[in-house]
Image (spheres, helix red, strand yellow):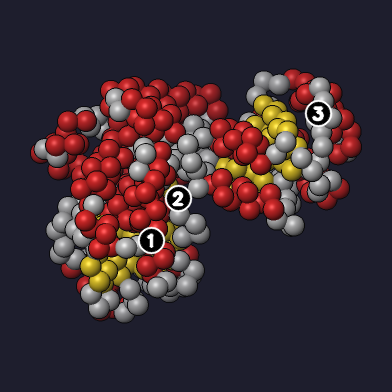
Amino acid sequence: MYRIAMEKLLKWKRSTRRKPLIIEGARQVGKTWLMKEFGKQAYADTVYINFDSNSGMAELFSSDLDTDRLIVGLELYVGHKIDPENSLLIFDEVQEVPRALASLKYFYENAPQYHIVCAGSLLGIALHQGTSFPVGKVDFLKLYPFSFKEFLMATGKERFAELLDQRDFSMITSFKKTYIDALKHYYFVGGMPEAVQSFAENKDFGEVRDIQKRILAAYEQDFSKHAPNDIVPRLRMLWNSIPSQLSKENKKFIYGLVREGARAKDYETAIMWLSDCGLVHKVSRVNAAGIPLKAYEDLKAFKLFMLDVGLLGCMAGLRQRTLLNGNDLFVEFKGALTEQYVCQQLKAAEDLGVYYYTNDRGSCEVDFVVDTGERVVPLEVKAEVNLKAKSLKAYQEKFSPEIALRVSMADYKKEEWLVNLPLYAIDQLDAIANE
């Protein structure tokens, strides 16, 4: 199964300024598979070390972090010589042995010839807890669930994914039924690798739902196992409130929907914990349109999205029939799924700052405002083909952006300052904004 991140890993391998690489991402987004597959494709030898419940490794890293000594210890553990040029060293669940994380600094400084990639499903938590961390001595790569483009490729539609990259919209429009059907499937299946693989092989929606339920149950177990005891009940309530938060007309996060009378300070730690695990995307409000957008961030107002559209549908109990036939049950929740989908694709794209805009009176709201590094692009999301965009017009009159995007099920169309972009082509946003 093809992952776009593989190209980034190959580029990292070729880099003359390569540092040990840390892959961040939620549990079950495919970090271990990606590292092993990278080793298989790009190296003669892969040395895989899982630090979870590994007393031998905890012992090895517990004394001094001399790299020569560590390499000898790793060679004894795996039973063969490690060739720095042709071996990939994989440290999995590295947060379980914080000293192994600290050792990356010494590998970078004293033994940069070794190729080391690390991952851990709760790495974000470990990094925030003041683990001795090699700041500036490592590279980072974030891994998300499969994007829609990767989903097309995984389900045998590689040519359709290539066509999107070519941005030949007259040809794309000719095949829009294929794209729209695939998008409906993606809304249900989402991008968790196990769900995608199952769907690609069997096209069994029931099996996909079972997998998603298992993944959600594993996340809930993580809350009890790894989170501080005092925030576990709040974590659960917060996590379970997300579908109802997103089904509101105004999707701004409301603490009162988690529990009556709830206040920000009661839930700030829980939100940070979910965010550090990669389970939620926190999208903050901005009230202006300058670069960088981060300078205009309002930290008190935000929307909370989940990591995956399929998991959101599963939590909300949406059935396959509802989704594919688009009956009334789905209509009410369609805006939530569509915005979740767009957020997920934007987050998976490279280096985009993602926010939303409301004016101070709250009379004008733009669903997403994206900082591409070169310009600020407002983005209105429509679940169907309804093309009224009053807020976008008000935003345009106030800030005069070079380009604004309305994403919907309608066909591609470019007007003066406004581009109508089909939902299934959202990953082309950066290229279109910079054309």
The amino acid sitting under disc 3 is Leu
Give the residue at mark 3. Answer: 74
Which residue occupies the extreme left position in the image?
328
The residue that disc 2 covers is 348
Name the residue: 83% across, 50% down. Answer: 109
Name the N-terminal-most of marks 1 and 3: 3
Residue 265 as seen in the image, left or right of residue 400: right
Q: Is residue 124 above or below residue 426?
A: above
Query: Alpha-carbon neighbours of circle 3 within 10 Å: few (<14), some, or many (≥20)?
Result: many
Looking at the image, do the residues carrying marks 1 and 2 touch, with CB atoms under 8 Å apart? no
Pick the residue in front: 308 or 76: 76
Q: Is residue 57 visible?
A: yes
Callout 1 amino acid: Gln
What is the x, y in percent for residue 240?
A: 34, 33
The x, y position of residue 148, in whole percent, is 36, 46
Nearer to me, 285 or 136: 136
Q: How many numbered discs?
A: 3
Give the mark nearer the N terminus: 2 vs 3. Answer: 3
SS of the residue at dot 2?
helix
Q: CA distance from mark 1 to mark 3?
A: 46 Å
Q: Residue at x 66, y 51 (%)?
A: 12
> Is any atom of residue 70 visible in this view?
no
> Which residue, given by chain and number where applicable, does mark 1 sit on?
166
Query: Where residue 207 appears, x then y in whole percent?
Result: 32, 22
Answer with the quarter of the image where residue 188 lies: top left
